[in-house]
Amino acid sequence: MSEARYLVERHTILSVVVGSRAFGLSTAASDVDRRGVYVAPTADFWRMSKPPTHVEGPLPEQFSWEVERFCELALSCNPNVLEVLHSPLVEQRSALGAELQGLAPAFLSRRAHTTFARYATSQFAKAETRREREGEPRWKHIMHMLRLMISGTSLLESGSVHIDTGPYRERLMAVRHGELSWDEVCAWRDELSTRLDGALATSPLPQHPDTTGVENWLVSVRRRSLSDGSGLVCPPSQ
C-alpha cells in the first residue's frame, strides 16, 4: 500500500460528499465528489521526506488534505475547504473530525470577500474565453460559479456558511440546462457581484479569523498523534 493511500485509509478524520449532491443541484448522472481531511502521524514529519499535503483518490472523485494544509486554506476562507466543514453529507468522522467541525466558526472572516470574488472572477473569465472560442460556455461550470457567488454573499451577509442552494435551485438548474441567455447570466452575475461587494462593509464576520485558536488546536492534534493517536481513527461507518 502506498503512503498516500495509507494516510487516507488509516488516518482520515473527516470525509464528506460535496458538489452538486451537497448543494441540492444533483441529477441522476451527478458524480459523488468526496473531500476529506487526514492527520499524518507526527513522527512522519521528522524525516527528510515530509508527508504529502494532499492526496487524490484512492476512490474516483476523491481528494483529501493533510490537516495543517486544510487549516491554512480554511483560514483564507477557501470556498472548497469551507464546504467540507459544512457539508450535511458526512461519510466518516472521528473524534478529531468532530472537533474540526466544531472549530468551523474560527476560520470565518471578511477575507471571504476577496477569496470568493477572486475565484468567481477567474471562473467567469474562463467561461467567456471558452464562449468566444467555441460558441458557448460550459453551463455546468457557470451554474457552480453563480452558486459560489450566492454562497459568498450569504456568508458575508449572515456570518455563516450555507451549502444548500434553497430558493435558487430552480434558476440555477435552468442555467445548467442552457435555458437562460448569456445576457441573463451576465446580469445575474453583476447583481450578485454588487451584493457581494455591498455586504462587506456591514458583515457580522470579524476582520480576521481566529488563527491562534486554530493553531492551538493543531498543536494539540500533533501532540495527541504522537502520544496515543487519540481521535485519529474513524469508525467503519457514520
Image (cartoon, rainbow, N blue to C red):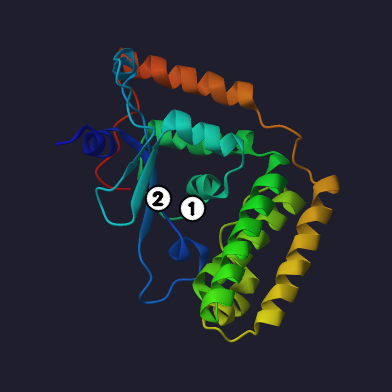
Residue type at mark 1: give it.
Ser
Q: Give percent across and percent down for residue 153.
A: 72, 57
Q: Is residue 211 left or right of residue 5?
A: right
Q: Give percent across and percent down for residue 189.
A: 71, 68
Seen from the viewer's position, the closer of residues 57 and 124 is 124
Q: Which residue appears at 65% of the width and 39% of the height?
A: 108
Label 2: which residue? 16
**Furthest residue to the front?**
133
Q: Which residue appears at 73% of the width and 41% of the height?
A: 110
Q: Which residue appears at 64% of the width and 73% of the height?
A: 167
Label 1: which residue? 87
- Note whether residue 219 is visible: yes
In the image, residue 136 sits, relative to residue 152, either above or below, namely below
Q: Give percent across and percent down for residue 181.
A: 65, 85
Q: What is the distance, in whole Å, between disc 1 and disc 2 at their CAs?
A: 7 Å
Compare marks 1 and 2 and give the one earlier in the sequence.
2
What secondary structure is marked by label 2? Answer: strand
Residue type at mark 2: give it.
Val
In the image, residue 35 sits, relative to residue 233, either above or below, namely below
Residue contact between numbered discs 1 and 2, judged by CB atoms under 8 Å:
yes
